[in-house]
Image: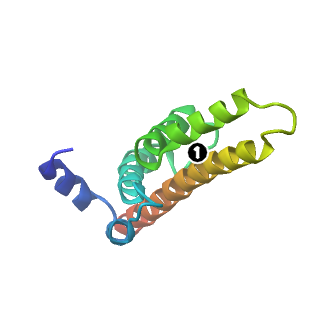
Amino acid sequence: MSRRREKKSARALAPLLCLLIEALKEEETKDRPGEAAALRAFGELALIQVPSRGALAPNDDELYDAIDRIARKHLGLRKASKEFHRATGAIEPFTKRDEVESAANHIRAVSDMAYFYAGLAFGITMMTIKEAHP
């Protein structure tokens, strides 16, 4: 994304969401890479989703696909999935249980993080829209 487009989209996001993104950028570590970028992407998705469909509509495959794309791009979901499939593909009864459990925990943690940040972005965006249009 160009710097000009990034500034334009940052102005469109809810001010509270921008503060959270900045806080995540400052706290970004080796163990938590991509969270600020993911939250920004979820905020941009929320700007499209919330006014037209509401917040996290159940059984919305297009929305879930968009959330997964963001998780793959910014939060490492693809790597976590590959680790899981590699581990389970080589499993023998009871011999690789720890490896399988670790991979399953990692994929769940990344997925949970993606849905948490998506919900946060959608909630803040919905709150901001409601304040602007009482």
Examine the rendering and report whether any part of residue 134 can be seen: no
Give the colour scheme shown: rainbow
Pointer 1: what residue? 57
Q: Residue at x 87, y 39 (%)?
A: 94
User: Would you identify the image quadrant in which residue 87 lies?
Assistant: top right
Could you tell me the amino acid type at mark 1? Ala
SS class, disc 1 = loop
Total marks drawn?
Answer: 1
User: Would you identify the image quadrant in which residue 60 lies?
Assistant: top right
Q: Judge by depth and name the residue closer to the eye, 121 or 30.
A: 30
**Residue farthest along the top direction in this orientation:** 89
Q: Position of residue 104 (x, y in %)?
A: 69, 45
**Residue farthest along the front direction in this orientation:** 95
Q: Is residue 83 above or below residue 56?
A: above
Q: Position of residue 4 (x, y in %)?
A: 12, 51
- The quarter of the rendered structure image containing the C terminus is bottom left
